[in-house]
Image (spheres, helix red, strand yellow):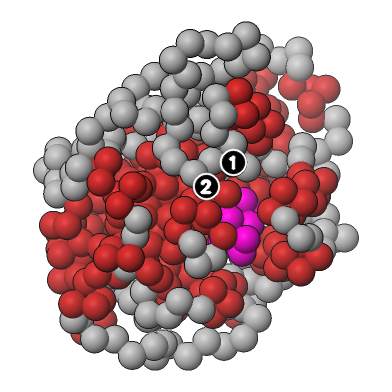
Amino acid sequence: MPGWTNLKNLVKEEITQRGEEGCDVSGFMERWEPASAEAELMALYSDLQKLRVRADFPYVEPSHLAGIRALRPGKPASGGWPFTPNDALFDRIHGAWLGRIAGCMLGKAVEGWSRDMIRSYLQAVGEYPLTDYFPRAEKKPEAIEHAPHSGMARGEWSHALADDDTNYTTLGLKILEEKNPDFTTADVGWVWLSSLPYHHVCTAEKQAYLNLANELPIDQVPLYLNPYREWIGAQIRADFWGYCAPGRPEKAAELAYRDASLSHVKNGIYGEMFCAAAISAALVTDDLNDIIEAGLNEIPASSRLAETVRDCLRWCKECPSWEEAFDAMLQTYYGKYSWVHTNNNLAIVLIGLLYGWPDFEKVVCISVMQGMDTDCNGATAGSIIGAALGAKALPGKWIEPLGGKLYTAVHGFPEPEIEDLARRTLKQAERVLAT
């Protein structure tokens, strides 16, 4: 998506964002359309910041940890599940890393495609429903309007390629190895600037990166000229915080909060907290209901994201197939949010889990076949079920193509072995849970 940092586009997206947050933005788009000068656009942006949430907005969505915890549906016990740093736990952490990377590589080939585009392509090449990495058609049939992104189809890579979804997982490991478990949001920002190239960040992260480089106060970093602050960027950074707090969803969510609040607010933060808590639970239980409940228990019951989770659970009861559940999701959310927003993409992940569990292949394939932010959703779904099953239980056809290696853009981690990443993660888990 070009133009992420273009001021005209930023102000347009800010109008949308303020409306989604519950503000009355009537008349703002009409003011935006003719505006071209920087002074005009910044005056419009300033007026948007003065808006207040409507009195009839049905959601309460704080962005500070105490407020978030006060609105949880229950009071989760901080003790969580028993934790033993043994070979079985290592296998599950390893499985989570492998599942995340495999799911990312699966979705990477068709990132941004719709469900209908994916289905028509797979039908044209005779591989619908999806059961493997995306093939590339040897000869392009007339019916095929799209092709997997260059170099990302089955057989075109011999190791896991660099991607922001896995860069952030690796960066989480780097943060804990260089800092202590009491790291701050400012520490996260420092590691970004010193270890993550600017051109490897997108949307909310790109705006936060600019704000960090321009030395804005840390509380302004997620806000200033950042209309993407509830998009999926924080949710894809959740995984490592779950990996390093196995069986401690509340702790995983707290670590995720410190990370997410650098670039996101409200539902953007909740997405990362939900996924971190769910992954934490998945490392010690394979009960999907418990895993989803662990995530739901860490976000405000009064939020739009909690409503999204509840919608998915209801659709699973009402709809016989994932296709029907996805149609219900579209009827509820199509046109409401960007294709890279937190809420609709978490719904896709949950549909993949609810209709595919406990089959790894079904979970990641259903998550990707729904379209939208496919690499992010395949990665998150793969991480959760990979944690629940463990590395030894993952099908070879999904794991062997990774070659045991992950390329990243993170400084100091150019070509790490995936198994080594898992072993280092286990060491950090021991540190976190010792505090």
> In the figure, is residue 135 to the left or right of 332?
left
The residue indicated by pointer 2 is 365
**Residue 133, image x, y percentages:** 42, 37
- Which residue is located at x 76 percent, y 69 percent? 317
- Residue 205 in sight: no
**Residue 221 versus residue 15 in the image, above or below:** below
Q: Give how far across and how far down residue 14 sits, in percent.
A: 65, 35
Note whether 410 is above or below 60 in the view shown: above
370, 376: nearer the viewer: 370
Judging depth in this view, the residue of 23 and 49 nearest the camera is 23
Which numbered disc flags the more N-terminal residue, 2 or 1? 1
Query: Label 1 amino acid?
Result: Pro
Instruction: Report the side of 136 relative to 401 (left or right).
Output: right
Q: Answer with left or right where residue 400 lies relative to residue 71.
A: left
Span shown in magenta: 346-355
Image-based side of 120 in relation to 276, left or right: right
**Residue at figure coordinates x 45%, y 58% from the top left:** 360
Query: What is the quadrant of residue 118 in the picture?
Result: top right
Q: Are marks 2 and 1 in contact (CB under 8 Å)?
A: yes
**How many marks on residues?**
2
User: Which disc is residue 196 wearing?
Assistant: none
According to the picture, the residue beneath numbered tag 1 turns out to be: 129
Secondary structure category for the residue under label 2: helix
Q: Indicate the amino acid at tag 2.
A: Cys
Q: Which quadrant does the C terminus fall into?
A: bottom left
